[in-house]
Each structure stands twice: as C-alpha cells, then as structure tokens.
Image: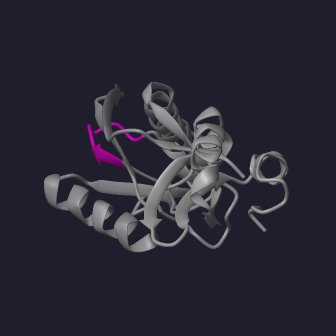
Amino acid sequence: MNYDVPMASLCDEQVIKKSRFITHIQRVKNKEEAKAFIEAIKKQYPDARHHCWAYIAGHPTATTDIGFSDDGEPSGTAGKPILNVLQHKHVGEIALVVVRYFGGIKLGAGGLVRAYSSSASLAMDKLEVITLVESKTFVVTFDYNLETNIKHLFETHNIVIQQKNYTTRISLSIDVPTTDIESLNTQLINISHGQVSLI
C-alpha cells in the first residue's frame, strides 16, 4: 500500500503563554533512526525543560513501529497527542519532537494536550511529503529480438531498470509498483507471444 513520507526535515515554533514549543520533524526508516534523531534533538537543546516525541518508523498503520514519550510532562499530555496527530495525517517513516522551554505559566493538563497537539499539527501542515509506492523486484529474461519492444513497454509504464545483464539473452532487473504488476504482466505476455512474463 502506498503512503506518504517526509520529503525533508522541518523545524517550526510557536509560543503559548510564554512557553516556547519548537517542533522538529525528520524522516526515519526504522526505530534506531528515530531514537538517534530524538537524542540529537536533546543534545541540540540541552537546557530545555522537556523533549516530548512520537514516531512511526514504518507504514502509517503499523502498530509495531511506533513510540512516544511525555518526557516529564504529566502522563498522556504530550507524547500520545503528538502520536495522534501523526496517525491522523497518515504519514509514515516519521519522527516528531516538540522541545518545550517553560515560560513560567502552567498550562494545566488540557492546555498541555492542546499545546503539543497544535505544535505537531502546525508543523505537519507545513511538511512536504512524497508518496512511497510499494513495489516488487522482478528479473525479466528474453531474446535480443524482443529488446526494443520490451524496453518501450517499460518506458510507457515508467518502470526503472535497476540492472542490465547482456549474455546469450538479456536479463533486466526491474521494480514494478504492486498496482501495475497484473497489467504489465499481461502486456509482456502479449508482446513476447507468451515467451516472457513476470511470474
């Protein structure tokens, strides 16, 4: 299933009742990258009162690749609200840290939930994303006389050839979006008169 991921890192800031909320977003491909990013932000703001965070280190609906922390804020007022924003936006491979510099005015539990949610939402609204298309890799082998037709077929489907191997026959390694496999396979069989298929 296709899903969006962050195109680039992003930093955003808002001030609520004298407290500064600085939001950092970065793409992370796994839990290790998410944790490394969170640690890097903590080092960047060592004097901040809180570094609250959430991440989805895979597919947006993956429940095994998520994590969140209130980092000293009252339980449930920071990490979970940030994670809720991420899940609502359906973006995967993402880590979001909200750094808080306390301004001397207590916000209360409801105020904290709103502050962390809005900090995450404002940053997510500015975030540029790209769509990851789920694909499968195939190796297609065929005779030289079919090369022109097959390469043309791949071009019309925007298929990227990853590897080429020219020996007694031609072997091409290709990545095919899962949504295109069936139609591409049918066309391959047709233009090669049944000699070539993906499966």
* Side of 25 relative to 193 (left or right): left
Q: How is the image coloured?
A: one colour
* Side of 124 relative to 43 (left or right): right
Identify the residue at horizontal 15%, vertical 53% (top origin).
Answer: 44
* Quarter containing the C terminus: bottom right
Identify the residue at horizontal 34%, vertical 39% (top origin).
Answer: 8
| Quadrant in the picture for residue 100 | top left
Q: Is residue 112 magenta?
A: no
Identify the residue at horizontal 61%, vertical 43% (top origin).
Answer: 154
Q: How many marks?
A: 0
Q: Where residue 131 appears, x then y in whole percent?
A: 57, 40
Q: Where residue 84 appears, x then y in whole percent?
A: 63, 48
Q: Is residue 104 magenta?
A: yes
Where 17 sits versus 72, above or below?
Answer: above
Q: Is residue 78 visible?
A: no
Identify the residue at horizontal 48%, vertical 38% (top origin).
Answer: 120
What residue span does the magenta drawing correspond to? 98-106
Q: Where residue 163 appears, x then y in whole percent?
A: 44, 62
Q: Where residue 150 appears, x then y in whole percent?
A: 64, 47
* Side of 187 relative to 13 (left or right): right
> In front here: 64 or 130?
130
| Quadrant in the picture for residue 174 | bottom right
Q: Is residue 143 visible?
A: yes
> In front here: 125 or 17?
125
> In front here: 110 or 4?
4
